[in-house]
Image: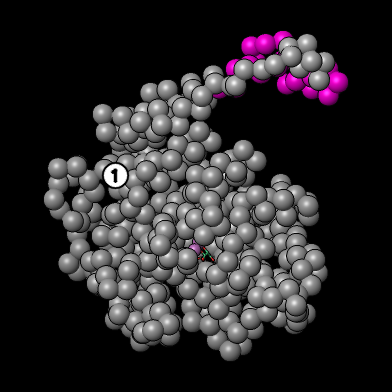
Amino acid sequence: MAEIFKNIPEIKYEGPASKNNLAFKFYDPEKVVLGKTMKEHLPFAMAWWHNLCAGGTDMFGRDTADKTFGAEKGTMAHAKAKVDAGFEFMQKLGVEYFCFHDVDIVPEADDINETNARLDEISDYIIEKMKETGIRCLWGTANMFSNPRFMNGAGSTNSADVYCFAAAQIKKALDLTVKLGGKGYVFWGGREGYETLLNTDMKFEQENIARLMKMAVEYGRKIGFTGDFYIEPKPKEPMKHQYDFDAATAIGFLRQYGLDKDFKMNIEANHATLAGHTFQHELRVSAINGMLGSIDANQGDYLLGWDTDEFPFDVYEATMCMYEVLKAGGLTGGFNFDAKNRRPSNTHEDMFEAYVLGMDTFALGLLNAAKIIEDGRIDEFVANKYSSFRNTEIGSKILSGDATLEDLAAYAADKKNVETPCSGKQERLEGIINNILFG
Ligand code: XLS
Ligand code: NI
Ligand code: NI
């Protein structure tokens, strides 16, 4: 196999003092943090679509980056060249997982049977590479948003025929995920939503999405898929309003339709901020509901209102992310770089530098989060803040569920007045974080 990224060496850890662009400054895979290696804490994954397919096209201009990897675009030879490039890329970086949509790995044909035959062929080829390298599949998914047939939705479409095509794609993508040993299967509903309620039966659409997910779970379990199904919440884009708006909404939906035992969340940082939340908020909501599954590791731009899918660079955000992940006991999934180079960063070297940035940012996040936990001041403050419920008779009575509204009202009447509760100390706590990070 001819080397594709000829000028790029294997990326190694050189430490914070290194000035080498193609070396890790913080990601030291074998370094032990809180009892586990960095590599174990941070199962990184490459997103096939952004890294191997997207060349920078936007609505104002065509590709700036060459992702042909020496083959003719849109051919099976190109599909194979992408596999070669992808595995060389992951190996050189020490990235151990990948994520894919069906149509990322082969060019879609006019006839779905032909597309499926191509998927069989390419997945055989991918398996060979997986065996050679030990690289694994984190999750698979079906692209049910690009093809024009999905313009009115996939699970939420008005057309029963289109619904069957969505089902057929999910079935095949599940077959592939199982064949490749994927840990998870993602539903991201980019077209599952509406532009205007004037033409939309929201209840009908949501019930149909649930039916499709139920069928997917039944089929997946039947063919031996033991991993998690994930919903990846996103409030908007491409639709004006998407049904999987945020984690709380998606979790409510799953519970309503009895899907909560099979599904978890795949939380993407940029989707969180589009929903008006912090990344940490979405992780916390998922974690406290027992549904923190996997992460799409990227970052948005606070000045722009769309999904910019930038490589993560914000160390504070990565720190609070890793704080949530550590407190939740880790992820069953991993950290998928659902991120793309900026359009002017158009060289192959830029692809590698972006991953070095992302991996180093999360390594810093991990190191910082471990320090916050070891320091203990934040956790101690939060525990103390609620101590009146644990250390007093009335508090314990409330927590035990034995108290009635009348009991509490009688207690208040007896006390006559109440002091303001303890200070929230936000500024002190923010200072503690700075002190831990930079002290
Ligand atoms: C798009 C989503 C998408 C999913 C997979 O905004 O992030 O890339 O991760 O379909
Ligand atoms: Ni996204
Ligand atoms: Ni994503």
Residue 282: x %, y % from top left: 55, 48
User: Which residue ends up furthest to the bottom in the rendered image?
Assistant: 110
Horizontal and vertical percent position of residue 312: 36, 54
Dividing the image into 4 quarters, which one contains the N terminus?
bottom left
Residue at 68%, 79% (x, y): give it. 152
The extreme front residue here reads 416
Question: What kind of secondary structure does the magenta stretch mostly adopt?
Answer: helix
| Mark 1 C-beta closer than 8 Å to ligand 3 | no
Q: Is residue 259 magenta?
A: no
Q: Position of residue 380 (x, y in %)?
A: 48, 21
**111 sits to left or right of 342:** right
Examine the image and state in which quarter residue 117 appears.
Answer: bottom right
- Residue 98 shows in the view: no
- How many residues crowd around disc 1 within 10 Å: few (fewer than 14), some, or many (20 or more)? many
Identity of the residue drawn at 49% across and 49% down? 279
Q: What residue is shown with label 1?
A: 27
The quarter in which the C terminus is drawn is: top left
Q: Amino acid at mark 1?
A: Tyr
Residue placed most toward the observer, 377 or 305: 305
- Is residue 112 placed above or below 377 in the rendered structure? below
Q: Residue at x 65, y 41 (%)?
A: 289
What x and y, as percent, mark residue 149?
64, 83
Is residue 325 visible in the rendered image? The answer is yes
In the image, residue 420 above or below residue 112: above
Q: How many marks?
A: 1
**Image point 40% across, 79% down: which residue?**
58
Work out whether 146 lies above or below 390.
below
The residue tagged with tag 1: helix, strand or loop? loop
Residue 393 lies in magenta, yes or no?
Answer: yes
Magenta stretch: give its range: 385-408
Q: Is residue 239 left or right of residue 46?
A: right
Foreground of the two, 132 or 327 = 327
